[in-house]
Amino acid sequence: MKKLRFIAIIIVSEIFCFTALNAQTEIIPEKTSYEDSSGLLYWNKDLPVYLHLSSKPDEKGNLLNSKVSAKYTNPFYFDTEGINYMRTRYAVDTATRKTVNPHIEILWEVYADGKAPLTKAKFSDAKKYVFEGKTFYGKGLRILLNAEDAGSGVKDIYYSVNSEPYKKYTTKLIPNPNEKICELKYYATDNTGNIEDVKKNKITFFIDEDAPETFHNITGIDIKRSIIALNTKIYLDASDSKSGIKATYYKFDKGPYIPYNGNILPLKQLTEDHHTLTYYSEDKVGNKETPKTFEFFLDKSAPILTSDVLGDRFIVNNKIYFSGRTKLKLTAVDNKSGVKEVKYEIDGSEFKKYTQPFYLPKEPGYHIIKYYAIDRMNNNTGISGNNVKNYKYSTKKIYVDLVGPTLKHSFIGKRFYTRDTVFLGKNSKIKLSAVDTESGLQYISYSIDGVQKETMYKEPFTVSGNGKHLIEYFGYDNVNNRNIGRFYVKVDENPPEPNYTFSVKPYRTENNLNVYPSYVMVYLSGVDRMTGTEQIFYSVNGSIEKLYTIPISGFTKGKNTLKFKTVDKLGNEKYDKVSFIIE
């Protein structure tokens, strides 16, 4: 009669069961057992335990009852967190069936796991600011959840943002910048179904990716003509609805930025001329406002006459270039009697009365514009006198540029021409260039296959994806005239398919290899659907690779391995090999 072996059969479900009840209900795993890769058995401490005796490893056996401790068995529960033992008094030799000397116990280890994992959230890659119990984060915030478990190990981490259903955590969290307030809840489960208390893992924070807004307020200004005087008062007013203003900065013209202290901006150091006030603010999580500008003329004397360009303008080497879309605006200011009239002429034509901004000539090349102003006392912008011949004109020499850059494209690397089509390989690049002999090239952009958004061209680029592609490229000069170029290319990223043919049929097979006579020859070929096979290379039994030109022969007796590759006209290549026996 066989002796019964003592085994513990622990009854559990085979899989976890998760049920999402609603947006704020945790996904509850079923409590279960778990055996790790080293064979250690973990048992959820809340699960009942039944012991069965069996003489075979694959049968349920007999339920083990205890007369001494009947009240606390069937089921019983583990009392100790961590390792627990089920044991016999003495070990018996499995061959002799005699007690082993010296006496030792037989122990069955089971690890009771009744403790849930512990999860921590790490916030990184963004500036942080805490004020009155509120935590603000700036741009680039990433949240890493990391859980640790001292027992059976972490199985899953779950999280919920702003009452959304819980999701399984897989990678760093990126908060939605459109959410003003984020409430993050998270918890972990271990491999025996213990679940962390989510009430301990609740974090509320604010996402602030919006820059502050700053405005200038002015008292004592000719708003229509943006002219100010020394007694003009300019203030800056900044606001931020979230983390708050850290600092406001301003500068005049090309000077350094200066922290704004809330007082009136100083003007006395400025000359009588056109100036630009530039200013911005920064909030407490590093969001910076795009600098704003206010252009004005500081009038310390009178009268003066100024001209403003409305539209495209570019200045280089003391030459001013304009486009055909540009207008010229004349502004006369007199702090005393006021302006009577302003007149102008173009290229020696008759003077006209100025009433509104006017377009520049629609003819390319240089043009001379003269203009003058008279105040109510007939003082003109230059010298005194009532005779127009004595007036001193303001003169502006401009160059009207109506034509965009000349465009050109070329190719770098492998390419193949056939009929009116150019084929490019996966590593071939397209080079764009442009020349503008007038205002000069500003930049080149391009698009592929009709994509509306233009990509700024910086360096030669590749085109991916087999087949035909439309390349459109655009050259902009410094007054925003544009020329367009377009062409088609075909991209071939697929190598030729290699093939081989033996000149005779095999005698037989040996060790799954075909056996051929010594005079056998091998023909190599390749098929390419686009540009065609250009070359075939081969090596026999690890020899130096050679260019294939004639059928291969002269193989050595015994096993031979022929390795070969096909290469198309664009450098796409593919290897193949065949092994065989020469008798």
Image (cartoon, rainbow, N blue to C red):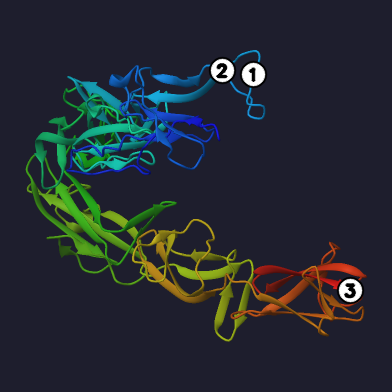
Task: Tell me the CA gap for discs 3 and 1.
Answer: 64 Å
**Could you say which is closer to the camera, residue 57 or residue 343?**
57
Between label 3 and label 1, give the one nearer the viewer: 1
Across and down, in percent, residue 221 comes to 11, 38
- Asked if residue 327 lies left or right of residue 73, the reply is left
Is any part of residue 146 visible from this angle?
Answer: yes
In this view, the residue in front, 552 or 337, is 552
Residue 568 appears left or right of 58: right
Image marks 3 and 1: residues in contact by CB distance under 8 Å: no
Disc 2 marks which residue? Answer: 90
Query: Where does residue 199 sit, x and y in percent of width and height?
Result: 21, 26
Residue 207 visible in the snapshot: no
Q: Amino acid at mark 2?
A: Tyr
- First in sequence, mark 3 or 1: give its number: 1
| Residue sitting nearer the eye, 95 or 228 | 95
| Vertical position of residue 409 compared to residue 164: above or below | below
Characterize the local packing of mark 3: few (<14), some (14-19) or many (20 or more) Cα atoms within 10 angstroms.
some
Residue found 29% across the figure and 71% down from its top: 362
Where is residue 567 drawn, in percent x and y?
A: 69, 72
Kindly report the distance in space between the C-alpha atoms of the residues bearing marks 3 and 2.
Answer: 68 Å
Quadrant in the picture for the C terminus: bottom right
Of labels 3 and 2, the one closer to you:
2
- Mark 3 falls on what kind of element? strand
Label 1 sits on residue: 100
Lateral position of residue 170 relative to residue 556, left or right: left
- Residue at left 48%, top 70%? 407
Sequence-wise, the earlier of marks 3 and 2 is 2
